[in-house]
Image (cartoon, coloured by chain):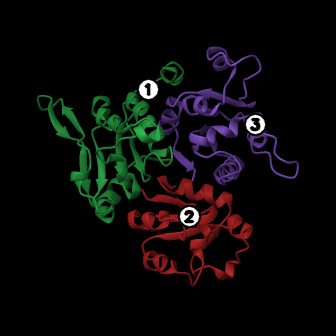
Amino acid sequence: MAEAAKSGAAPAPAKAKKKFLYVNRKAPYGTIYALESLEVVLIAAAFEQEVSLAFLDDGVFQLSKGQDTAGIGMKCFAPTYRALGDFGVTKLYVEKEALSERGLTVEDLQQVTYEDENDGFKAKPSIVLIDRAALAKVMAEQDVILSF
Amino acid sequence: MKLSILINEGPYTHQAADTAYQFTKAALDKGHEVFRVFFYNDGVYNGSRLTVPPQDDRNIQKNWSELAAKHKLDLVVCIAAAQRRGILDEGEVKRHGKGEGAANVAPGFRISGLGQLIEMGIQSDRLVIFGD
Amino acid sequence: MSMLHTVNKSPFESNGLRSCLAHASKGDTVLLIEDGVYAALKGTAVSGDLWRCRIDVKFCVLGADLAARGLDKGRLIDGIRVVDYGGFVDLVTEHGRTQAWL
């Protein structure tokens, strides 16, 4: 892939890891932000930093199950979230208030799991339901917050 | 302090690139180091040498190119976003057979991978994002 | 360390400011830029949101964006600090990190 060939920068030297949070506040397909944010996350995983994702506001729609883009002629990237665990990205914070404001529950989201290497590679849920106040704390603990 | 800038929108439609430019100039004036400016999403259009704005308007691409020359700024256009949107350097033009002279990345900009964005997040003291 | 939040959209068009305020922590600063500066005006339907938060969060507004939009400083909610681009840079360095509410 061109991306890998030209990614230029080698992963950072052994330094203290930074905490990166990718904030997703936009719905998929109407604009490209959700997809291009996900593309950054996939590259970020190679840099051995602490990476987590937050879904709030319309960003929670990115995880809706049953996405079928055949009719709009665009690539469906929803399955890519399910692959994040293989890249070591295992924390997807989803804000409870954002879900309920939109008439959604966690049942409306696709399941995302990762294999926990510290627990016999058991499948564990990546989605962490979190309320707004707790998400604010998560944000406050980050070194770098990326939004697109 | 070491600062980096991420620009997610193209020129003219959104103010993001203008604000980012004014911010970058102010940071340099204050003696801060600007480690890198990264152009992503439609932001890659800031790096097209083919823009020809009216003479009484600002030339956003030229402003960046001149600022880069003056301060040795590292202006990086994301390759994946750029290929989608038709911003190519000589190497990419050849690789994709787009014909001689098709390269349109502006002076002072270079095309590279998303790793450059992650790296600047790691290396910089602060990352400031401009978009819409 | 505290956070600098930037909001660049009109509160009449987008929920960016509202969401920012709901997720900001005590000691943070919110900088209104671009169309975000409309949130700084007194007597609007959203001024109340800013009033309720102002004890915990500081507000600043980018002066060049106010001037460009013909907004006089006299129309600002009391206590909102006007900064220039250099002041924006200072806010970035004074806070531990920056979050853009795009």
Tell me if residue B18 comes above or below residue B100 in the rendering.
below
Indicate the quadrant where residue B35 lies.
top right
The circle on residue A110 is: none
Q: Which residue is mark 2?
A: C31
Instruction: Tell me if residue A141 can be seen.
Output: no
Disc 2 residue type (three-letter): Leu
Spatial separation of the CA atoms under disc 2 and disc 3: 28 Å
Q: Nearer the viewer, residue C47 or A11?
A: C47
For the residue labelled by badge 3, is the local secondary structure a helix, a strand or a loop? helix
Q: Amino acid at mark 1?
A: Pro
Return the residue at label 3: B65
Looking at the picture, how far across and down is residue C41, in whole percent? 60, 78
Q: CA distance from mark 2 to mark 1?
A: 34 Å
The shade of chain A is green
User: Which chain is mark 1 on?
Assistant: A
Report the mark closest to the observer, 1 or 3.
3
Q: Which mark is residue A13?
A: 1
Residue at the (48%, 63%) spot, across then down: C16
Question: Which numbered disc, 2 or 1, marks the residue closer to the eye?
Answer: 2
Report x, y in % for residue A101: 32, 65
Question: Is label 1 on the same chain as label 3?
Answer: no
**Chain B rendered in what hue?**
purple
